[in-house]
Image: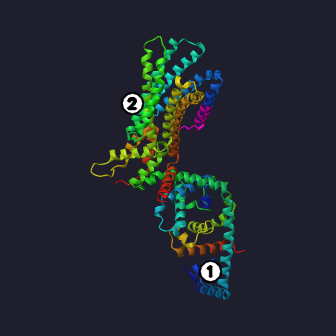
Amino acid sequence: MPRMITYFRVRGCGREVAEDLSQEVMLAAYTQSSRLRSRELFRPWLFKIARNAFLQWLRRDSREVETVELGAATWQPESRSTDPLRTLQFAQWMAALDSEERQIMTLRFIEELEYHDIAEVLGLPLGTVQWKIFNSKKKLARRFGTP
Amino acid sequence: MEMLHGITEQEWLEYLDGGLDATDAVRLQDHANTCAECAGTLRELSLWREKLVEAAALVRSAVETLPGDVDRLLAESIRRIRACEPAALRSNPRWSFKEAVVLLGLLVEPFCGPGTAGAAIRLAVRRSTDAQSDVPAVWNLFVSNMSEMISSVCGTEAGRLVNQVGICLDVAQA
Amino acid sequence: MIERPASDRPAKVLWAAMATAGCLGIAAVVWPVIEVLDQPLRIAAYIIALIYWLKISGDHPKGSTMRTAWLLLAWSSGVSIIRHSFAWANYFAKWPVSIRSFSQFPTMIALALLIAGLFAIWFGFAAIGLGVRFRRSDPIWVAVMGILAFVPYLFSWRAVSGYAVIYPLVSLSPLLLAVPLLIALLLHRIEQEMGGGQLATSLRLIVAFLLMRLVALTMNSPALASFTVSKILVGVSGWTSIWFFALAAAYRWRLTLSIRELTYRYQTDPEAELAGLVLLAENQQDVARR
């Protein structure tokens, strides 16, 4: 449950919305549990449900799906102006990446998912995920330098 | 996937994560010791990995949920799940007729005693049974008859309870 | 909105009242002045019983046998209130026998209503197959009860009244005593066949009420009344018997409240309650296997 809340919070949801969406994820996980093919796939499966819930929430709120990931420059000002996450360095770094890189890096470092889990959640090949992470770090190093 | 001096991005990442097998790890390290470009890449990747891990930890702590809130939210989730459960269960019959009869009998025993429960069940089965077989054809008919028997001695509320619980039980029809 | 049921307190109060009445009944043997409390206590018990029987009758559909039974018991209680009010008034007014003998009317009516109510209870259970099988010892019990029922009658010929209509009523009294006793036997068999449960407790208390009445009437007959043991038995049984009647009603009402509480729990959390029921079934199976 806390990880679900973190998932939604770092993607720009307020606390109440994050809690509500987390409960929706729990309920969906329970009612759709028969669709889980194996226990090993539980984590990516749960995050897939979370991602779908997040995208549905975006559509309900008429937000632009592609742009409301962590660090996106086109966030609606009124929903982000008081968001303390924007002041955190992680968010600033993510803003330098493209949407897909941002999603992958967030899942890797915030949600701490393994490469194959990230591939499962986003529906990408494993090699693509690893290449994207490699590339993202290189991009960040070029943009912000290496300490 | 691009390769830098014969080393793929996958191998770089797995080396940093400690996921590379010993032979490949030695090969990569040996190469990094001799190639300035690859040594620079390795240092870059390693340092950014550390920075990203630290920064991500700060993000998680900024949105951390308090234990009390977790308990509250879990309880709320369980409540929502339970509110949905009857619909899910109805599609999956769980009880045989005999099992369900036993459960209904146990339900009423504290009020009317096992003897009355047994008498009511026997009478309800007899009234619900097809003359050609000894297995009641329809669970709902049995529940209705049982409810009538129990309410005749214990009151309308008892009959209503039997009806309510009988409907809750998902019984596989014969 | 389902109301939450009351606690066991009413039953505890009635048990305490019965114990108090029993003590007062014994004390009245030594201090006759305490007898002034006899009739008010009976009236109080009948009022409580009347209220409960009426509430209980509301839990059955109109025209049903059990509803009729509980209503008959309620009316019997109502007529008994009139009878004992008359007796209490007489305690102070000291009316002559000719006036006092009128108490036979409400006495007989109350008894007749009681018999009809008890018979209706038996009929209600007989409809589902309970109380229709008898044991070999039952004829002996019937004979004993018949003899005991006639003991008061043997001495009732001494009753004096200025009204001829009273004597047939008096002569009917053994019948009206014996029949409730027979029905008591039927109810006892029913509660044995029930094998327990809250409803069986209520029936048991009705049986106790009828037996205590018989003991009180028998011990109070002129041939036995002079003995101290008889006086004490009359004191205990006579003063406590009606409280068994009130307790029977209270326990039957508690059954309705228990059912309401369980209905509420099933409405609130059906899965948890069903899980508890399943666990009970599994435990019983384990016990049976052992």
Toward which corner of the image does residue C6 lie, by quadrant? Answer: top right
Q: Which residues are magenta?
A: C1-19
Per the image, label 1 sits on a secondary structure element best described as: helix
Instruction: From the viewer's perspective, tell me whether residue A84 is left or right of residue C78.
Output: right
Quadrant containing the N terminus of chain B is bottom right
In the image, residue C13 lies in the stretch drawn in magenta:
yes
Task: Determine crowd level at label 1: few under 14, some 14-19, many 20+ residues with C-alpha closer than 10 A.
Answer: many
* Residue designated by label 1: B15
The spot of residue C146 in percent (x, y) is 43, 30
* Residue designated by label 2: C63
Residue C110 tag number: none
Work out whether disc 1 and disc 2 sit on a shared chain. no
- For the residue pair C259 and A88, the one nearer the viewer reads as C259
Where A34 falls versus A133 (above or below)? above
Mark 1 vs mark 2, foreground winner is 2
Per the image, label 2 sits on a secondary structure element best described as: loop
In the image, residue B4 lies in the stretch drawn in magenta:
no
- For the residue pair C47 and B125, the one nearer the viewer reads as C47
- For the residue pair C165 and A40, the one nearer the viewer reads as C165
Where C27 falls versus B100 (above or below)? above
Give the residue drawn at x 64%, y 83%: B38
Give the residue drawn at x 54%, y 72%: A116
- Label 2 sits on what residue type? Gly
- Label 1 sits on what residue type? Tyr
The spot of residue B127 in percent (x, y) is 33, 44
The spot of residue C9 in percent (x, y) is 60, 36
- Could one spot residue C289 in this view of the protein? yes
Chain letter for the residue marked with disc 1 in the picture:
B
Mark 1–mark 2 Cα distance, whole angstroms, equals 86 Å
